[in-house]
Amino acid sequence: MITVLPVETPGLGDRTHLAHDGTTALVVDPQRDHDRVTELAAAAGVRITHVFETHIHNDYVTGGPALAREVGARYLVNADDEVSFERTPIRDGEIVEVGAMRIRAIHTPGHTHTHLSYALEADGEQVAVFTGGSLLYGTTGRPDLLGPAHTDTLVRAQWHSARRLANELPDDTAVYPTHGFGSFCSATQATGETGTIGGEKKDNIALTADEETYVERLLAGLDAYPAYYAHMGPANAAGPGAPDLSPPSVADPAELRRRIEAGEWVVDLRDRTAFAAGHLTGSLNFGLDGPFITYLGWLIPWGTPVVLLGATAEDVAEAQREMVRIGIERPAAMATGTPGDWAGGEPLASYARATFEDLARTLDRRDDTGDTGDTGDTGEPGGMVVLDVRRNQERREAHIPGSVHIPIHEIPARIDEIPAGRVWVHCAGGYRAGVVAALLHARGRDVVAVDDAFDNARAAGLCPLPGDATPHPGD
């Protein structure tokens, strides 16, 4: 009886898998904070003897080397990957015995050139295949992370790799990908939480469309991916060590103010509603209730010190754990409590929140009178900017006419392009709008965060264009 247990990392949209036969276990694609894996193995009463890497990851720092060292396991990485650490090299077609399990490496290029999938057999039956960033639920891993010079080769390789898996494995083989649960490593939005080879043959574009159709549709669906990805490959090739999750030093109000004035990022982890109502002047907001680490890692100038503000020490610890997953090793400091505690007697900052209906009424009032009653940062009445921070693909599907469009990941570099006036910031669901509103407010801009689902923009008469306005998982 083979058991496969997932270890979810929702903030990055990834899964690590632990498979065992009741005594012996293997791990595929462990995250940096591998203590979650060892705890799972201990609870199951099994010993980890092998750690498999499907590829050199681009979206997170691996926990593979540190986990293997800690438990005394063999660490298997494609022999063709150029790495700076000791590993057990493995190649296409090789078989590895792990207790009652037989693991066969299958070369499945597409997400990377050296990507491997691992087929698991027990008692003469094919049980599962760990597909990493190759065959995902309903889609495949994206082929463009190594740069445009590789994209055409990789996208075509990805189609052939999916076909190879479908041809070589029985229909009832369970499919266990690493990416595809909101990960930007997924070429298009993955569907479902479980799957089999047979199911993918019916629903996966790589297995239902011819090569040219697949290539055309997949490339058309690609959009921007987080900037921090550029740092993940080199970190993983170097062999990252175990993370330090011990609590950072505690900063008092004077230190927090000094750090803000020095240009460090003082990040409030509370939700966007609480932040808008009152916060430490100059602080930023990346709430733990949403894709915190994706957008923190995407927007921050790499290497900028980060200070964490949380209601509790547990909130800070959660954020710190997410940070090490992408190689932000240590917070510079922390503080817990309330904004009043952090401000040390200084007045708190705040800004307005609104719905799309509120925005529609304000625009109607401007059209009727030429004056919204708003006061922009110029101090003159009537200044108003509608800022859409969704990605290009979302914008093409539907948008508010007359709005300024700067995708969230371009805001730091293009912040001076935002016209003068009160800025009404919106996205598809509210999270990204809250992040950008906080960034702008810290720069002295007058902002309104539109905290609403974009479907309501159409209902309010703001969005007459056809298109699917369903909020993206990133919101």
Image (cartoon, helix red, strand yellow):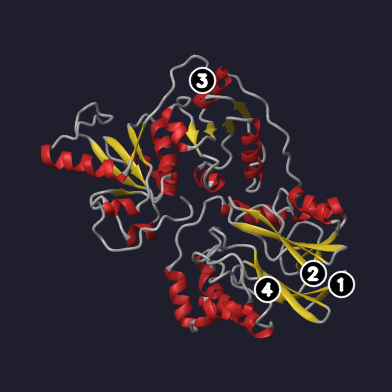
The answer to whether residue 66 shows anywhere in this view is no
Q: CA distance from mark 2 to mark 4?
A: 12 Å
Residue 390 rendering spot, x and y as whole percentages: 39, 52
Q: Choose top left, top right, bottom left or bottom right for residue 81.
A: bottom right
Q: Which residue is mark 2?
A: 2
In the displayed structure image, the side of residue 238 where residue 350 appears, left or right: left
Badge 1 element:
loop
Q: Earlier in the sequence, mark 3 or mark 2?
A: 2
In the displayed structure image, the side of residue 246 where residue 387 appears, left or right: left
- Side of 126 where 464 appears, left or right: left
- Residue 340: which disc? 3
Residue depth check, mark 3 versus mark 2: number of the one nearer the observer: 2
Estimate the x, y position of residue 90 in percent, counting from the top left. Answer: 78, 71
**Mark 3 to mark 2: distance in Å?**
53 Å
Q: Nearer the viewer, residue 68 or 19?
A: 19
N-terminal-most mark, 2 or 4: 2
The residue at which mark 1 appears reads as 100
Question: In which quadrant of the rendered view does residue 126 lie?
Answer: bottom right
Label 2 crowd (10 A; few <14 / some 14-19 / many >=20): some
Residue 371 lies left or right of residue 299; in this view the side is left
Amino acid tagged 2:
Ile
Ranked by sequence position, the earlier of labels 3 and 4 is 4
Q: Which residue is mark 4?
A: 174
Q: Does the residue at mark 1 contact the one at mark 2 (Cβ under 8 Å)?
A: yes
Which quadrant of the figure has residue 336?
top right
The alpha-carbon separation of the residues under discs 1 and 2 comes to 9 Å
Image point (85%, 64%), residue name? 22
